[in-house]
Structures are given as C-alpha cells and as structure tokens.
Image (cartoon, rainbow, N blue to C red):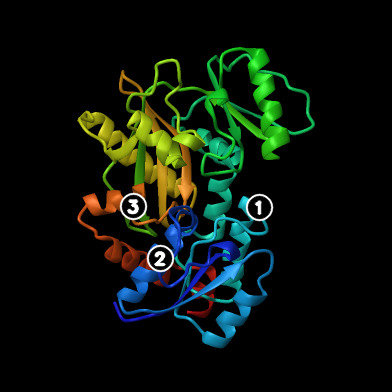
Amino acid sequence: MRKLRTLVVVHASLVPPESLEGHSDKEIEEWRTEYDVTTTLRNSGHEVRCVGVRDSLTELRSAIGDWQPDIVFNLLEEFDGIVTYDQHVVAFLELMRQPYTGCNPRGLLLARDKSLCKQLLAFHRIPTPQFSVFRRGARIHVPRRLRFPLFVKSTVEDASLGIAQASVVEDVAKLKERIEFVHAQVGSDALVEEYIEGRELYVGVMGNDRLTRLPVWEMVFGSMPESLAAIATRKVKWDKRYQAKYGIITRAAEDLPAPVLAHLDKLSRRIYRALGLSGYARMDFRATPDGHVYVLEANANPNLEAAEDFAESARAAGVPYAELLERLLQLGLSYRAEWRATYG
C-alpha cells in the first residue's frame, strides 16, 4: 500500500506519547491501543498525526481541513461520555467526505443499541437468548417467557461496564435489584436475557462486501470456582491479577465440532450483513454442550490492541499486526459511502 497521511482520532484523554519510557504500567494500560496503532502505522511508513476528541468536533474539523488526511483511523468509542454518540462522529466524517477505518454510522447505531440489535437478530431468526428490555422509570414486570437464571446488563455500555457476578440472578427479587442497579449506577435501560451455560466464543470478521472470518477465539475461565458464573465480568476482562489468580485466558478455540464451526461461520456472516456492518467487528457467542449456538452481541470496532483478541486471532490466521492495520486502512479507503456514490 502507498504511504498514507493518516489522522488517528482518539478520546482526548487517550492521546498516546511517542515513547513508553517513563510511564507506569497502569498509565500505559489506559492508552495501550492508541499507542500500538499510532506506533505501528508510523513504523510502516505512514505519516501519522493524532487528534483527541472529547465533546467538540472543532479540532477534528480543523485537522481535516488543514492537513487533508488520506484517511482517518477511528479509535473513538464514545463522544462526550456517551457510547452511542460515536456514530455521530463517523457520520460527521461522511459529511466531510472523509474516508475512515472501521464501521459505518448505521452499523454502529444498530450494534451499539443492544436491545435494537437483539430485535433485528430475532427478526432474521438468528438464535439469541430470550430477552426483555426494562426501561428506566417504568414498572418492573417480568415476562413469563423468561426462565431463570437470567443475565442483566446495560443496553448500551460495552467493555463489560456494569457486569459482575451479581449480574446473573436466580429469582425475581435479585432480578429487580440488579435492574435497579443498572438504572441507577450505569445510567441506562437494562437488558435481561436468559443465561446460557457453555463455552464463550469470539469470532472476528473483516470486510465491506467480501467478508473474511478470523479463527474462532475462546475465553477460558481457568480455575474459577464452580460457585461463580463463567461470564466475562469487568474483573475477568480487565483485571490482570484476577486473571492470573484463576488462570483466565483467551486463546484459539480447540476441539470445536465441525458442525459448530460451520454454524459459527455462517452466523457471523449473517449477523454482519443483517446489522449493515463494515470494516471489522467481533461477534460474541455461547456454545452449549449439546452443540447449540447463541449470539450474545455484535461488537463493531472491537479493541485493536496488539495483544488483544482481534489482533491475536488475525495473527493466528497468518496476518501480523502491521498487516492487519494495513488491511483496515484499505477497507476504509474502499468503503462505498453514500457520498462516493454521489460524487464518485
């Protein structure tokens, strides 16, 4: 690929330094993804600038107007503290007729709103756990179709925010307590779905029209006590000491039956297209011991840290990290946004 003028867009608090020297491990963890991406792009010969965005698009607009980048590498996961507003930043890039990496605005909207996403998946007859949405300020009425145990989470937040062992509930009293927790502490509506016991599987997909499915990845819960639910809580996903204590790791899924693997491949592609995703995404599944597969959610623009699941699964497919970023750049340049259809 030719060398590109690349504007990396990140949250204002996550603009990475040029070197790791002098920074603590805790500091580095905060902006590790941003550092990995910007450093790798520079090492690949691209001209890279980084702009931080918090609650205004003024600096982003100025950077695009003054520097005229070939492409924006989008690493934003929110705008003004609101997760579902990242779609508007991408929509702004389209209004500016600016090529960008990652998912388009409509795909972000559908994937970020978990309740809407689940409704679309159900419409397309894609197997997902039975669910119900409990709105803030509304009376809590539990539909008869929901069977305990149930899993309670936010309808919009990601990165396991608000998810803990208490998220899996066995009775109505605990269910109401957890719904109220999500309403009050997370500040969103609550999505309640039937808890599926089984293997936690992640499937990465890249592409716009033609799709590439990456090797299936799995979260292995190690030696966690049987009294604890095997779920990706915030501690399980992000607390390195907790992971080391119980031997929690993610790795290539082993010994998956051929029918399950084929089903995961088919479902991942169907989900990607049903939600209108582009660029890259990761689908989260549960596979039961008897071979049934259920999609839990779709994650547009998943974490791109070099040591995280998406990059690791790409590496397992023979795609090194630098090449992965190159592919995402190319997908961004080739995405047929509406402005391209109008202006060529």
Image height of 117 relative to 139, above or below: below
Calculate the distance from the C-alpha at mark 1 to the C-alpha at mark 2: 29 Å
Q: Which of the two marks, 3 or 2, is nearer to us in this view?
A: 2
Which quadrant would residue 264 be assigned to in this image? top left
Residue 261, given in percent of the width and then of the height, sits at 26, 35
Q: Is residue 213 visible?
A: no
Q: Which residue is mark 2?
A: 20
Tell me where residue 145 appears, x and y as whole percent. 59, 16
Q: Who's the residue at 59% across and 76% down the image?
A: 96
Q: Which mark is residue 307?
A: 3
Out of 196 and 115, give the one closest to the viewer. Answer: 196
Label 2 sits on what residue type? Leu
Horizontally, is 319 left or right of 90 in the view?
Answer: left
Residue at (20, 56) in percent of width and height: 318
Q: Is residue 343 left or right of residue 4?
A: right
Is disc 1 placed on a helix, strand or loop? Answer: loop
Q: How many marks are shown on the rendered structure?
A: 3
For the residue pair 113 and 219, the one nearer the viewer reads as 219
Instruction: Categorize mark 3 by other alpha carbons within 10 Å: few (<14), some (14-19), many (20+).
Output: some
Which residue was labeled with disc 1? Answer: 82
